[in-house]
Image: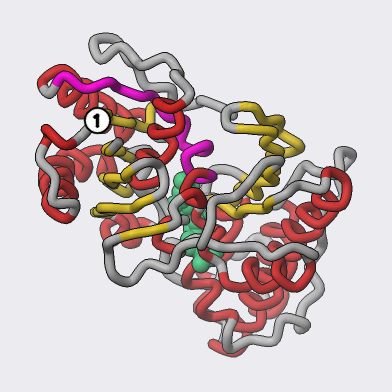
Amino acid sequence: MKILGIETSCDETGVGIVQDGHKLLANEVATSMDIHAEYGGVVPEIAARSHIEFMMPTLKKALKTASCTWGDIDGIAITYGAGLGGSLLVGVLTARTLAITHNKPLYAINHVEAHVYANFLTSTSLPDYQLAKKQPTFPLLAVIVSGGHSQLALFEDHFTYKLLGQTQDDAIGEAFDKVAKIIGLPYPGGPSVSLAAKNGNANTYKFPKAKLEHPYDFSFSGLKTAVLRTSQQIAGVDISFPSQQIASRLSEGQKADIAASFEKTAIETVVDKAVLAFNQFSPASVVIAGGVAANQELRKQLRERLPINIEYTDPKLCTDNGAMVATLGFFKAMHHSATADPYTLDISPNLSM
Ligand code: KG4
Ligand code: ZN
């Protein structure tokens, strides 16, 4: 069974084609990130307009890469939430139209759940993908870390899970993006902070880890503020100084030390909670999901601290893409989940897990 997945919740136009929920046949991603970088963050209207421009070429490319025609496709999976309204609308209307005109079943997909399913891809005909060797098994602990989410979820089985905890304020990816802005590194902050951190000493600054009432909840806004205050101190200015001008007063070495100290604290916070959950629930598998799952420090720390052989999917499948959407679509089809009505499926920008 071949499922075509479409993802447009933020600034990536993703179309993936996946066979039987494990074989990656195509994963085409076009992004408007370069334009957003000029503004230091995603501009929703630009993201939506870019999806309109990228959608048909990306679809065509994916079908070509997978050597498929529409006749070979058994179903269409579409992210309908959570995400930016305008961006979701382009994807959902495209998927609805395709489902009607090609007479295919339509599966409505939760973006955050889809991130988890990137870990179910285990083989591919494409070059340059490093995938897990086998699919994760249940019970499954999912560490979900993206630009919009920081969550720990325990899956008893497909579609049966409970949320152990989530962020009370900023998501971890958001914290990376904001810290990058403070120290003058380009958007998106995750990759640029990580790169700068490689040249820094992670023990230079001691940043706080939030203490919360519920052990599996997260909070990253205090950490972000601590980075801002430390940067102001190093720059020799007070809190009335315009925050966007702080970076010009920091040396490359200071930026690297701040980046490394921040990354260490942010990642340790996630790993501490993952280890705690592992010890409490003894899952058979642990997976990491979402854009921040591309982070090498997270991968390293989890490997070191979890007494389990943890397999990681390719970083290209951690950030937003259509293949993860297609993979979850397959499992929906297998579990006879209700299909979406192609005439009425609406977007759900605030959809939660
Ligand atoms: O999952 P994603 O592509 O979009 C959302 O669903 O939010 O995640 C994007 C987030 C951004 O905040 C970006 O800075 C972060 O993932 N990110 C990273 C890395 N690559 C992307 N964070 C840390 N390290 C990375 N290597
Ligand atoms: Zn995402």
Query: Start and end of the magenta stretch?
Result: 103-116
**Residue 170: in sight, yes or no?**
no
Which residue: 63% across, 46% down? 137
- Residue identified by numbered label 1: 74
Q: At which x and y percent is residue 17? A: 27, 45
Which sits in the foreground, 136 or 39?
Answer: 136
Depicted 232 relative to depicted 69: above or below: below
**Amino acid at dot 1:** Asp
Which sits in the foreground, 20 or 273?
Answer: 20
Q: On the picture, is 77 further left or further right than 290?
A: left
All told, the count of numbered labels is 1
Q: At which x and y percent is residue 97? A: 16, 22
Quadrant that contains the N terminus? top left
**Residue 145: in sight, yes or no?**
yes
Quadrant that contains the C terminus? top right
Helix, strand or loop at disc 1? Answer: loop
Which residue: 36% across, 16% down? 339
